[in-house]
Amino acid sequence: MRVLLVKTSSLGDLIHTLPALTDAAAAIPGIRFDWVAEEAFSEIPRWHPAVDRIIPIALRRWRKAIWRAFTSGEIGEFRQTLQEREYDLIIDAQGLMKSALVAKMARGLRCGYDTDSIRDPRAATFYQQQLAVSRDLHAIDRVRQLFALALGYDLPDTADDAGIRQHFKTAENRSPYIVLLHGTTWPSKHWPEHNWSQLTQLAAADGYQLRLPWGNAAEQSRAERIAKSCDSASAMPPLSLSEVAQQIATANGVIGIDTGLSHLASALGVPAVTLYGATQPELTGTRGSRQKNLQVNATCAPCMKRHCDQLNEAGEPSCYSTLPPEQVWSEISQIMQGNAR
């Protein structure tokens, strides 16, 4: 059976989709997937053994110069690639107009969430098969149930399995280290920089090195400033997404804010603590026996705002004063030692 999966972005959304592929591969011997994913995240589908072909799409880039994308032939080439195969089933797991239009370009039976289940009800009109999935479920459970309904198997009563751990090398003898995920696109999600600096000192005192990946110039500058506060901390060189994943996969632990790489740590089963301020973990938080979600204790949180309107005198989201570095280090230490509460 050949299935086309449309799930273009974001990083965390793609990670949330992986357990559904694991379910399907276990339920239907020989099933294979092609996956349409945003070009920036096209490495992720390659990590799963049930995926044969990745079809990159550049919606984010095309939106900035749509006429150029048409006249250059890039969009036409994408459509031609999409239509090379006829699929037994096309699953739109994104549930937006942009993804529904992509699904409509492909050849095969289209299915997705029904109008009561979907993020954008207009998109449901493009599906030949509409499926009801509760919006009160965690994002991972929603996709797992969507796949089970679309492909006709019973939803397994098993823990999430992203199916990607075997893709990465196992840890070799090396100094213990922790990865700090400090970057995010929402200013309101940023844990104060001085907290990161204090955290590196706490970790170093317990014998750990700290590694700080980054994805753009602003994150690189932040990583370098944090690293200057501790001899055991270092800003990492430029890395691909797969290289960052490898660093996470062999880490002793991960501490991060609500960002896609934190969900990657969860998918890889690495001990991790994720910090939530403006957002909440109930429906999209990291999950797993070695995961801990810490949410601020403030009346204004979760505000679900990209920009905080409750800044302290230093210009930082005031809610994070309730998540001090000492608490964060205590939590990750317990998880790494196998004593998580």
Image (tube, rainbow, N blue to C red):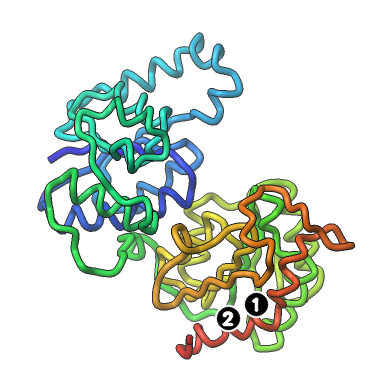
Q: Which residue is drawn at 36% across and 47% down?
A: 45
Toward which corner of the image does residue 179 lie, by quadrant? bottom right
Q: What residue type is labelled 2?
A: Ser
Q: Nearer the viewer, residue 225 or 283?
A: 283
The dot on residue 209 is 1
Q: Name the residue under label 2.
A: 175
> Which of pointers 2 and 1 indicates the residue nearer the eye?
1
User: How many marks are shown on the rendered structure?
Assistant: 2
Disc ID at residue 289 = none
Residue 115 falls left or right of residue 244:
left
Return the residue nearer the eye: 107 or 305: 305
Tag 2: Cα neighbours inside 10 Å, few (<14), some, or many (≥20)? Answer: few
Which image quadrant: the N terminus? top left
Distance (Cα) linking label 2 and label 1: 7 Å
Mark 1: amino acid: Gln
> Relative to 83, does residue 249 appear above or below in the rendering?
below
In percent of width and height, residue 124 lies at 31, 31
